[in-house]
Amino acid sequence: MSKELTKEELEEKVAELEQKIRVLEEDLIHDSLTGLKTRKYFTEEASKYYDSITDEYTYKRREWFGLKHIGIIFFDIDHFKNINDTHGHAVGDAVLKAVAKTIESGVRHGDIAARWGGEEMVVALLGMDEKGAVKKAESIRKNIQEMSFNNLPDIHVTISAGVAVFEAGIPFDEVMQRADKALYEAKETGRNKVVIFRA
């Protein structure tokens, strides 16, 4: 026969379970390698914000506070396959983590930085217009270009970036596709640069 728990023991067990639930929830919204948010979390949260600025009533309220924009930046590590092939996947993982950390530290609290897949990452800059988004992308690009890896001095990491911003009447998925197209153009025209989507 099992002994009954005291009130204190029961409270301790409940606290342990709550902590385990918090850890599980964190695991669900964070990429296990980079620590950035997951693609699923990014899509849900960024599209919620997008819906709120395209809703007529909320849009007017956000416009009063200057929050009527959203900037999307896609980042991709240039020649990442070469890093993996030359130095191995452990080094590739270290590069991914370092780039992710630089991207995350380069955005504001409240913005969303996520791993989109492979070596591609994405950022949603909430309330930021095109000029601000381009400036932010360029700043992050420069910071990554200046990164060094003490134990691997021959590694030089650069990224390409594609920027798109909210436009009235454009669905969220289309803004994402525009940022992705701009990234593709950056990679096709020399890499290590920021390209803004132009229709």
Image (cartoon, rainbow, N blue to C red):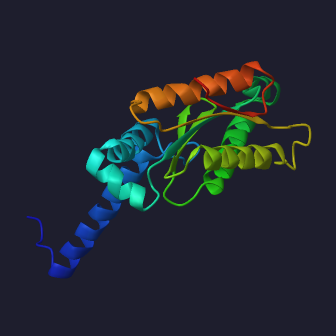
Q: Quadrant of the N terminus?
A: bottom left
Position of 126 with respect to 96 (left or right) is left
- Picture coordinates of residue 128, whole percent (x, y): 54, 51
Q: Is residue 119 above or below residue 60?
A: above
Position of 71 with respect to 157 (left or right) is left
Picture residue at 57% right of the left edge, 58% below the top: 108
Q: Position of residue 144 (x, y in %)?
A: 77, 45
Q: Nearer the viewer, residue 103 or 176?
A: 176
Residue 141, percent across and down?
A: 74, 43
Q: Image point 65% across, 22% down: which residue?
A: 184
> In terms of image quadrants, where is residue 45?
top left
Residue furthest toward the left? Answer: 1
Identified at 77% across, 23% down, the residue is 85
Name which quarter of the figure residue 97 lies in.
Answer: top right
150 lies left or right of 90: right
Q: Residue furthest top?
A: 188
Q: Nearer the viewer, residue 188 or 121?
A: 188
In the rendered image of this protein, does residue 61 appear above or below residue 196? below
Q: Which quadrant: the C terminus?
A: top right
Number of marks present in the image shown? 0
Front position in the image: 17 or 75: 75
Q: Quadrant of residue 82?
A: top right
